[in-house]
Amino acid sequence: MNFRKEHTIYTAIWAMLYASPVVNIYTRMAGNPRITFSWGEIFHAWAFTSIWLVMFAIHNFLLLPILLKKRKTGTYLCLSVAILLAGTFINYMGRPKHRHIDETRMEAEWKADSLAYERVAAVRLGDGRYCSPQNPMRRKPLDYQPIDPLPMLGPGELVAFFGGLLLMGMNLGVKLYFMSQRDRERQKIIDQRNLEQQMEYLKYQVNPHFFMNTLNNIHALVDIDPERAKTTIVELSKMMRHILYEGSKKLIPMTREVEFLNLYVQLMRLRYTSKVHINVDVPPQLPELKLPPLMLIIFVENAFKHGISYREESFVNIKLRVENKRLLFSCCNSKPTQVQHTNEKGGMGLQNVRQRLELLYDDDYTLDISDGEKTYEVKLDIPMQTRLPDAEAENNNNRPNS
């Protein structure tokens, strides 16, 4: 795509350059009826422009790769100067009577120039100068000063040299701009792939962490109530199916993530006694919005792990709301008076979810953790999407039934 844009710019520039002699002669004809259309003048201008075109092509296709790909700046500069000098020399050799300028011919052409000659109504004086006949004493005589430039330093050669330099600089600037565009696109693709790999790594860290905690819960239920342990194994299979089929996706419907949370809470209810109060406040009807899988379970799991005590009254309050396509989630738990021996605050799970939030939402999220004297509360505010990517939607259609 950038290749087409780049060469479209070049084509437009050269079209304007080749059209400029025609536009110029028609403009002059409109201002002076004595000037007639001349194909010879136009072909001469096109021949001059073609020198630039050849210089541009050599610079674009041969010299720029030396600079941009091989990084040979010295070679590039030397060859660029050589191309400019060669173009200037070709223009000099193609000019009629290039060695000397005929002063008599130039004076005759100057007098024949209708615009300059008629404007001053020139009258020749004895010393060869011209002045206005209306007031020859007051008006400063118009001196004819023939131009006798040194070889290869005439106006045409200077235009050829600096015009070629300008075109080569333009070519370099356009090339560097589109190269930077391509580099940014490639870097964006690389960053996206790195992002996906990091998120997959973090998710697969979460899964074993969660799985080990759930097995510990089942182990405790086996001693407390074997029948309940059997029911818990069935619930666990549903949860593991969620991790297996939903955890590998970028986004899942919010209803499935809430179902997964309810299964986990139900498993926790089987384990704990009546001293533990578990409240889940979720709207009965949830909108068709999507969020990353296994994003909320870490907070709930952390609340049960660090906020529940068998010896005293404790609670876990989970609340979920959706406002303006943003998920407002909070999880508050009590803190036991007797200090439990656990890992650093928040554990590995919270560290992982922080990294996932940074990778997914950059600055468009809020994670507020309040560690009070008696309570520990997490509040999360993240944006939600209204539809799945096409590939994800196809995978959902192929998902096996629970």
Image (cartoon, rainbow, N blue to C red):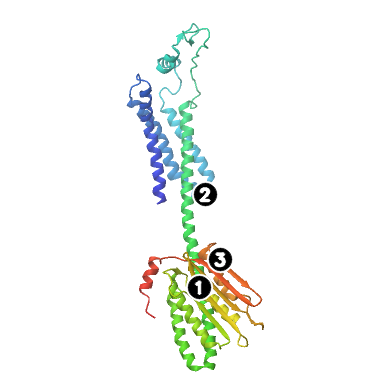
Give above or below for 226 relative to 89.
Answer: below
Q: CA distance from mark 2 to mark 1?
A: 57 Å
Give above or below for 253 relative to 274.
Answer: above
Q: Which residue is mark 2?
A: 71
* Badge 2 element: loop
The C terminus appears in which quarter of the rendering?
Answer: bottom left
Amino acid identity at mark 1: Leu
Amino acid identity at mark 2: Arg
Residue 366 shows which numbered tag? 3
Q: Residues within 10 Å of mark 2 (few under 14, many from 20)?
A: few
Residue drawn 52% across the image and 49% down it: 71
**Image position, residue 249 (x, y; %):** 44, 71
Q: Which residue is mark 1?
A: 320
Give above or below for 295 relative to 225.
Answer: above
**Image position, residue 187 (x, y; %):** 49, 58
* Badge 3 element: strand
Residue 3 shows which numbered tag? none
